[in-house]
Amino acid sequence: MKHIALLRAVNLPGHNKIGMADLKAFVIGLGFTDAQTLLQSGNIVFSGGTKTTTSLEETLERAAAKQLGLETDFIVRTAKEWQAIIDANPFPREAKDDPSHLLAVILKDEVSAANVTALQKAIVGREVVRAKGRCLYVVFPDGIGRSKLTTAMTEKKLGTRGTARNWNTVLKLGLLTESS
């Protein structure tokens, strides 16, 4: 079974540094196969594991802390779950016209409609958010860098942690699940 693991908050300036070759070796060392990384932001696709994605997250987090000294969240989805994220995108026009300003925030937990509404009400710019399952889709029409919609605000309002990837990266990760 193919899985995608996203590491939260790695390779930021002076914070949670890990090379992608080291990440790949780490995952292979845990007994997984077909490991492929994408970019330098902590994205890895691998095969193996019969555990639930939650169990895989816990296994990867514990092992990374012990073996690498890396304290961060791993968010894992199966290839099928990843395809569902792609298929559920409520912003197809933005995905086609401006994919770098469309983010999928892959969440640890499913969020309530009330929490999503609270986040929508807290937005002071033109950003638009929608949630489906354990994914929050966010459009940043004026760019991400100038937005007041921060990770901290999003996680506080939703009551869970997550990690964001732009739509180009989401699609590339999906393609990696199709290759061997």
Image (spheres, rainbow, N blue to C red):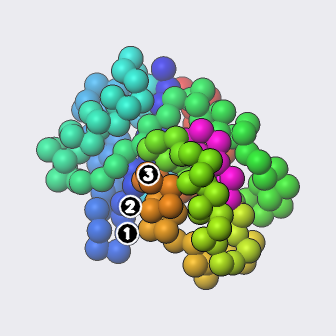
Outermost residue on the left side: it is 66
**For residue 134, side relative to residue 66 (left or right):** right
| Helix, strand or loop: magenta stretch | strand
Please name the residue that numbered disc 2 is placed on. 9
Q: Amino acid at mark 2?
A: Ala
Do tag 1 and tag 2 residues touch (Cβ < 8 Å)? Answer: yes
Work out whether mark 2 precedes mark 3 in sequence or the reverse, and give the earlier one.
2
* 61 part of magenta stretch: no
The picture places residue 154, in percent across and down from the top left corner, at: 52, 63
Q: Which residue is mark 3?
A: 160
Q: Is residue 49 above or below residue 18?
A: above
| Residue 87 x, y percent position in the rendering | 73, 37
Judge left or right: residue 180 versus residue 5. Answer: right
Q: Is residue 55 left or right of residue 179?
A: left
Give coordinates of residue 92: x percent, y percent.
82, 50
- Mark 1, residues whose alpha carbon is within 10 Å: few (<14), some, or many (≥20)? few
Camera-near label (3 vs 1) is 3
Q: Which residues are magenta?
A: 129-137
Q: Give the vertical position of 6 relative to 142 (above or below).
A: above
| Amino acid type, mark 3 | Thr
Q: In this figure, which residue is indicated by the disc labeled 1?
A: 12
Residue 132 colored in magenta in the image: yes
Q: How far apart, in angstroms, are the residues tagged by discs 3 and 1? A: 21 Å
Q: Residue furthest bottom?
A: 146
